[in-house]
Amino acid sequence: MNTPLRRWSYRRPLPPLVALVLAWIACSLSPSPSPPTPTFPIPPLPTAAPTVSPLPPDAFATAPRYSISLAIDPAAAQVTGYEEIRYTNTENTPLRDLYLRLFPNTPGYGGAVRVTALRLNGETVSPEIRLGGSALRILLNPPLAPQQSITLNMAFTATVPLTDEIDYAQFAYVNGVIALPNVYPMVPVYDDEGWNVEIAPGYGDAVYSDIAFYQVEVTAPPTMTLIASGECSVPEAGRWVCAAGLVRDFALVLGDNYEVASGVAEGAIVNSYFYPDHREGGEQVLQIVINALTIYSRLFGPYPYAELDVVETPTRAGGIEYPTLIVISERLYDGHPRLEWVVAHEVAHQWWYGVVGSDQVDQPWLDEALTQYSTLLYHEFLYGSDTAAAILESDFQRIYDQLVDEGTDMPAGLPVAAYPRELYSPVVYRKGALYFHALRQRVGDESFFAILQTYYRRHRYGIATPESFLQTVQAVTGNAQRDLYERWIMGTSR
Ligand SMILES: [Zn+2]
């Protein structure tokens, strides 16, 4: 996720000279046909993505499998769904219960979803309703033994808010656009804390989930355009069939009036969907995604999916990441100087959150701070070291210095809920990114990029923790450089 537009004002009034410099930086960030020439050498971008050996074919035999049918009625702002989940216990311990998350019922989504029928291995069950209706607890009796599977079948109905006033408006039907992330019941992650079912504050990402497989049938008015995670068939009479493999969740957007510009990057099809009066912005977005996907593939490891869709929506976040699908705020398409930063940030999330999963609710720095630093790398490799250095100073170091000056510095490694709303982005996104810069300065470029590539390769399709990042640093450099982690992620200046 990117911090919301209206909250990018965490800044004091600037002296005129600083304002002038920032205006110049803002200009240099705007996509332009002739980006400034780098003024001193930067490491050359590799000519191809690093090779990554394929995983064995049975590596994902136990991943959750979702088969979903969604009937979308825009006039009623309603979704009717049927769903089957095949879930295998991959833990070493029997599971006595299983949770389903109903994200539309969380305050940050502001909608409603109700499971109207639920069967476990064919038998009707009555789940316990938890967490304000945003979780269902299903007792497993007998407990589900390791490596054993169950099948859940359910029917549900969801209502979509007709307003963009609820947090980031990520789940909403506004301006002819229906945005439906996580509209279906989904299984959360079971880890050493047990089931992860807490409600995240609306200003952070809510979903923490395992890699899974999805097959989704969507019916909707045939005049609408569907954009979804994975790949979808050409519609026939308002019916689409979509498949998404090795993804953490399934999101879709339906719009009355989209136009599309398409291209190819690193073998993947890139589609930029935009409103008809935003063609110039939509084409800029396409180019940014192509550049970002190329740079990240070569720096971190290959983008493994066949497609990446970027969609203009009324979201009040700058942008939000979903598997193979990114939404970008309609407010950025008219020459907004932050467009390039936001798009490049959301593309980086396909690596950090998408392929390499992490607990976005309890350890948001692990994907957000690394994604921010990746966005800085995008600017470095596209526009040169001077541009990157100026951004590092203005958008990261200066904001961190301000936290220190004002006595509001906090550790960057806390759960989303530990931060006051106004400090979440400055501490987690800005200060957190300085950890990666300090690490790079300490170990040098060669080791730093080897760390990121190794981290990506080791944890692709899995779930990484701060400890697994430190173990990767240890493996590559012979030292976990833990003092930098203690300083930037777990420490404060106070
Ligand atoms: Zn983000």
Image (cartoon, rainbow, N blue to C red):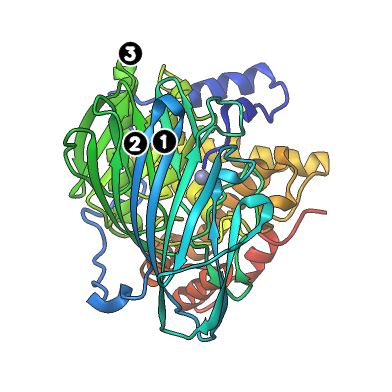
* Residue density around tag 1, few if under 14, some if 14–19, many if 20 or more, within 10 Å: many
Report if the CB atoms under discs 3 and 1 are less than 8 Å apart: no
Q: Which mark is residue 310?
A: 2
User: Residue at the spot x=41%, y=54% of the render?
Assistant: 249
The local secondary structure at tag 1 comes to: strand
| Residue with the mark numbered 1 | 327
Q: In the figure, 1 relative to 86: above or below? A: above
Q: In the figure, 100 relative to 421: above or below? A: below
Q: In the figure, 479 relative to 218: above or below? A: below
Given residues 449 and 278, the one toward you in this image is 278
User: Residue at the spot x=69%, y=28% of the render?
Assistant: 11
- Residue reaching furthest to the top: 277
Q: Image quarter for residue 15?
A: top right
* Residue density around tag 2, few if under 14, some if 14–19, many if 20 or more, within 10 Å: many
Q: Is residue 406 visible?
A: yes
Given residues 114 and 32, the one toward you in this image is 114
Report if the CB atoms under discs 1 and 2 are less than 8 Å apart: yes
Q: What residue type is disc 2 on?
A: Val
Q: Is residue 345 visible?
A: no
Q: In the figure, 226 relative to 459: above or below? A: above
* Residue density around tag 3, few if under 14, some if 14–19, many if 20 or more, within 10 Å: few
| Residue with the mark numbered 3 | 277
User: Residue at the spot x=30%, y=18% of the render?
Assistant: 280
Left or right: residue 86 compared with residue 416: left
Q: Image quarter for residue 335?
A: top left
Q: Earlier in the sequence, mark 2 or mark 3?
A: 3
Instruction: Give the Cα separation between the discs numbered 3 and 1.
Output: 17 Å
Q: What residue type is disc 1 on?
A: Val
Q: What residue type is disc 3 on?
A: Asp
Expressed as whole percent of the image width and height from the top left, the position of residue 311 reads: 36, 32
Figure disc tally: 3
Q: Earlier in the sequence, mark 3 or mark 1?
A: 3
